[in-house]
Amino acid sequence: MKRRLMMVERIMYVDTITPLNCVFTAKITGNLNPENLNIALSKIQLKHPLLRVSIEDDQKGGPYFITNQQVKPIPVRITERLTDDDWLKESETEWYKLFDQENVPLARIVWVRSATVSELLLVMPHCVCDGTTCVALMTELLSLTDNPDRDLEVYSTFNSVRELMPDSFNIAKSTRKGRFFSVLGKLFFMLRSIKNKHGKKNNYVLHWKLDEDKTLAIADACKNAGTSVHAALCVALLQAFQKVSGDKAKGKVISPVDIRRFIPAIKHDTMFAFAPIVELKLDKNKELDFWSLALKLKADLTAKIKEMNVYEMLWIAEYMHSTVNRMIKVLKASDGSHDITFSNIGRLNIPETYDTFNLETIYSPTVVFPWRNANTLITTTFKNQMDFTLMSNNGFLNKDEASKIKATAMEILFAHLQQLSHA
């Protein structure tokens, strides 16, 4: 395999000196067998081609994913578990560690270990994974560590964007669009004033989990109101930003969408990094109540997803490589037009019980973007418990202010749940 990183992968790669890692954590009770864990990682590495590549940045047109015959096994770093928050500390450590050593694979494991409780942290660079990838690999890791005799089906990856295109795709038309947007993009980014305002290692994460009663109450209320949990959370978030941040609030949220619903070649257990985004606005009509706003936002999201032409997006993006360095500089310097990026990975279909251990809980991924506006909220649901991680940097959104936004969003959401139940 020798494939140039797609434009969307290229942005998440950033450059040779900037880490952009995803960390996905599972809490386990019981005994993990170290030998079984290594067997599991070996089989996972054999299945997924992107775990057997190196990223080479010194060739013309690069960087490239190139198959590395000398790639090492996925490494496991073991650390002693002293508190329930050690996984968070290890996550923060992993944010800043590059995958830059010779022949290392693009994944690693941190095992936070005690006699009866462990956390397994799966760490990957964002240029090879999205949330669905993290869930798929964690599912495989737990299953194989429990039963190393089972096998995984190895697959071949694509070597160019063209291989993902269906026969009906109009390449000529999309190529013309790509060339046009390439010229437009160059002009746009050339005219942008860039001042790097982002400090390094100034990041933080806030983590919280809702119990089963609260999680089910949210789901039931949204169902009764005819809207989605995602839409209700977006409204609560945006209203919280307005209440806490005042005039600084933008009234917009960015939501990534799982590309697998559009491209059959990218399966649920295929490693992939691109998630197209939709921008959602909070309606400014002050006469609309919370649930009306959530209904409207859900309808807006549904319409925008329906209108997506993901094949064309992927194709056109490949003509934007010449703008990528300037684009990254703008992301590092710009406040953006949105309050937050909100990724709802949803309900996780990972088994809870195994022969040799139990899966106590899943923590939502942590990821720190090197952009000035690094505001990111990720949520997952496991065992009917909704879990949240909120990340940013103090240079853009002070941690105390972020804590107030988090608390206010939850207060807004549950206040309207009570109003709906009393209606």
Image (cartoon, rainbow, N blue to C red):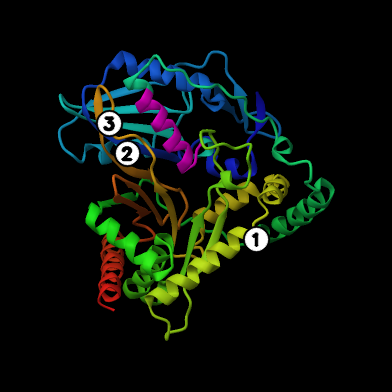
Residue 270 lies, in percent from the top left, at: 54, 33
Q: Amino acid at mark 1?
A: Glu
- Up-down: is 230 above or below 100? below
Closer to the chain start, of discs 1 and 3, is 1
Residue 322, how many percent across, how many down? Answer: 70, 46
Q: Name the element at disc 1.
A: helix
Q: Residue 168 at what x, y percent from top left?
A: 79, 45
| Residue beneath the point at 32% across and 37% down | 25
- Quick one: SS at disc 2? helix
- The residues bearing labels 1 and 3 have C-alpha atoms spaced at a distance of 40 Å
Q: Position of residue 285 (x, y in %)?
A: 47, 83
Which residues make up the magenta segment? 129-143
Q: Secondary structure at mark 3?
A: loop
**Towards the viewer: 338 or 275:** 275
Badge 1 vs badge 3, beta-carbon distance below 8 Å = no
Residue identified by numbered label 1? 307
Disc marking residue 91 = 2
Quick one: which residue is furthest to the bottom in this view?
287
Mark 2 → mark 3, Cα distance in angstroms = 25 Å
Three-letter amino acid code of the residue under disc 2: Ser
Q: Is residue 131 magenta?
A: yes
- At a point 49% along the width and 57% down the height, the residue shown is 255
Snapshot quadrant of residue 93 = top left
Which SS does the magenta portion mostly show? helix
Residue that label 3 marks: 353
Quadrant of the image occupied by residue 375: bottom left
